[in-house]
Amino acid sequence: MEAVLRDQLEYLIQLQDIDNQLLELRQERGNLPETVERLRAEIEETTHLLDMRREEQLNAGKERRRIENEVELAKVSLKRYQEQLFKVTTNREYDAISSEIESAKSLIQNGEARIIELLGREEELAAQISTLESHLDKIKVDYEVRDAELQEKIAETSDMENGLHARREKIVGQLAKPVYAHYERIHLAKEDGMGVAQVYMGACGGCFAAIPPQKLMEIASMEDFILCETCGRILVDADSMEKERQ
Ligand SMILES: [Zn+2]
């Protein structure tokens, strides 16, 4: 058993542990900024939608009141024409007034139909606006809570992150350059950031490929760096290392 190599393996395990913690910190934070951003975008969208609905409601109300006035005026005219109808003396006059009556009636009829339509739309819009308003209130609260959480997390994890980076630097300083270079290459290439893999039940703990018995013995003896032939991770045998420590 070569003491230096054993130390190197110990450092590698410590390095892996620090990198796991750093990855965890990033993952923890990595989710929260997205959530905060999603909520912020949703607030913007909902506010925009609410503005549009409110404007439509305003316009529908304006149009309805305009038509209501027109209908009122048409009713007054209709009454006047109907009175005039009794006083006509010529057929020509009769036809002219009849035609005015018809157009006033049709204006009233169309106007009243449109008023009903607009009232229905206004009612629909009022319901939509109220739903959007309560949704907006809810996501605003959600946003504030999540954003505060994120700011807090950034504040509290930055200390932890800096501490981990400082420890990492020290350990890297203890590692032989080619060993660290190999670790770093695998660590950066793998999604789980695992450059060192423990042997579990005769298999690589990183990719789960079976390790030949001869290699298992070499790993346990800690006489050389043994890499997984499948994934390239540096293999360590936790049990043998535990025994060595005692
Ligand atoms: Zn492997």
Image: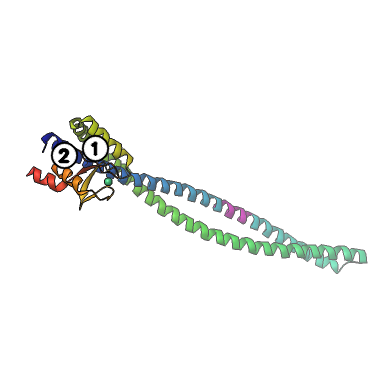
Quarter of the picture holding the N terminus: top left
The residue tagged 2 is 10
Q: In this view of the protein, which residue sits in the foreground, 78 or 17?
A: 17
Using the rendered image of the protein, determine whether residue 93 is visible from the camera's viewpoint. yes
- Tell me where residue 59 appears, x and y as whole percent: 61, 53
Q: In this view of the protein, which residue sits in the foreground, 178 or 230?
A: 230
Q: Which residues are magenta?
A: 54-62
Query: Are the residues tagged 1 and 2 within 8 Å (C-beta)?
Result: no
Decide: is 125 above or below 42.
below
Say left or right for 111 vs 206: right
Residue at image point 29% right, 39% down: 186
Magenta stretch, overall SS: helix
The residue tagged 1 is 159
Quarter of the picture holding the C terminus: top left
- Tell me where residue 125 appears, x and y as whole percent: 55, 58
Q: In this view of the protein, which residue sits in the foreground, 76 or 5?
A: 5
Say left or right for 117 vs 156: right
Q: Residues within 10 Å of mark 2 (few under 14, many from 20)?
A: some
- Tell me where residue 157 appears, x and y as whole percent: 26, 41
- Tell me where residue 88 appears, x and y as whole percent: 89, 66
Answer whether residue 110 is magenta in the image: no
Q: Residues within 10 Å of mark 1 (few under 14, many from 20)?
A: few
Distance between the Cα atoms at labels 1 and 2? 25 Å
Residue at image point 19% right, 46% down: 214
Residue at image point 48% right, 58% down: 131
Q: Secondary structure at mark 2?
A: helix
Q: In the rendered structure, which amino acid carries the disc numbered 1? A: Asp
Q: In the rendered structure, which amino acid carries the disc numbered 2? A: Glu
Answer whether residue 58 is magenta in the image: yes
Using the rendered image of the protein, determine whether residue 90 is visible from the camera's viewpoint. no
